[in-house]
Image (spheres, rainbow, N blue to C red):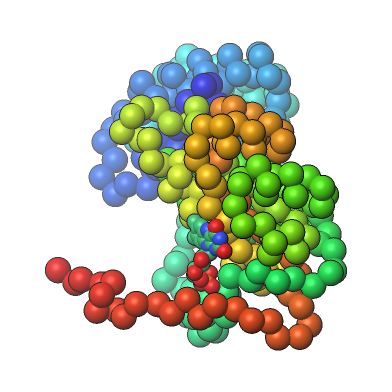
Amino acid sequence: MIRCKILLLDHQLEKAQTYNDLKAGYGKDKIGNLKSLISAYYNKFGYDELVQITIGVIESHLQNPYSFKSDAIKFWFSDFVKIVSVNDEDKKGGIILCNSGEYTRIDALFDFFLQRHSCRSYSNELIMDEEIIQAIKYAQTAPSACNRQPVRAHYYSDQETIKKIVLAQKSDINWCLNAKGLFIITANKSYIRDYYERNQTMFDSGLFCMNLVLGLHNEGIGSCFKMAQKTNSIDKNTKKIASIPDYEDISVLILVGKYSKTPTVIAKSKRLSIDTVLSIH
Ligand SMILES: Cc1cc2nc3c(=O)[nH]c(=O)nc-3n(C[C@H](O)[C@H](O)[C@H](O)COP(=O)(O)O)c2cc1C
């Protein structure tokens, strides 16, 4: 899939610049491949965020004193930038300087993590689309393997649709029907290159979901995961009802609703001891 290949090369050329031991002329094959792919992509799909990201990546690659840069690539790039007529602020990819050592510890963060619990009982208040968009912005801060970002979030607020999806999953439904919204989190299967990467999309989904539920909690929205039933027929039927394309793999469902103004019962879900979980070798 061309999008995946471009994202991968973008990442490799960005990442290369973060190493301390860059070798002169690095990235020859990769910049050549990226040039061909982004040209073909632009000719087929036109100007979009992937073109913006890639232009930023190529520009920063060409500015790096150690990178491979032939006259042909430099000429092609200056022409390409003119053809797509991109502003400086729309050159999205590349590198930045980050002063992580200067960040101050957020003491309240651990308390914030402790405060989130799976919530299976919600208020009647509706969730606005802007709140859902904000929650996805939290989720998107999660990393993904090679920054390929295969995870997709499908959101449903129509009660009939939620009911049909939950029923299609063939499991306990009562608490689910109390929810005001439902996410189905998927990952694009074509973003995996080979068998050895087969678990990466599910792992990426997990990271995305954790940031999503923490973000939802910060916005006053309770949530509870619901594991996806992975038999072929249930999976197929769910995708049909939920309008999810076949090339996406369902990772998990998440029921959501605004927290009630009065206290609700939650499971303690007590965590095991540090001794059980951690082995320092
Ligand atoms: C991948 C996953 C699947 C889950 N599936 C269900 C489910 O099908 N039904 C349910 O009631 N809770 C489900 N949960 C919620 C867990 O029971 C809950 O996260 C766990 O008990 C820890 O509690 P906490 O979320 O309050 O910290 C699931 C959680 C995860 C991470």
Q: Residue at x 46, y 41 (%)?
A: 201
Q: Position of residue 237 (x, y in %)?
A: 64, 33
Q: Position of residue 21 (x, y in %)?
A: 25, 45
Q: Quadrant of residue 209?
A: bottom right
**Residue closest to the eye, 264 or 60:** 264
Tell me if I can see residue 43 in this picture. yes
Q: Quadrant of residue 50?
A: top right
Residue 101's place in the image compared with 181, above or below, is below
Q: Residue at x 68, y 31 (%)?
A: 240
Tell me if I can see residue 55 in this picture. no
Q: Position of residue 132 (x, y in %)?
A: 74, 56
Residue 56's place in the image compared with 133, above or below, is above
Q: Residue at x 57, y 74 (%)?
A: 117
**Residue closest to the eye, 173 or 109:** 173
Left or right of residue 216: residue 74: left
**Residue closest to the eye, 238 or 220:** 238
Residue 271's place in the image compared with 61, above or below, is below
Left or right of residue 162: residue 202: left
Left or right of residue 240: residue 104: left
Q: Residue furthest left?
A: 281
Q: Position of residue 42 (x, y in %)?
A: 64, 19
**Residue closest to the eye, 161 or 281:** 161
Viewport quadrant of the C terminus: bottom left
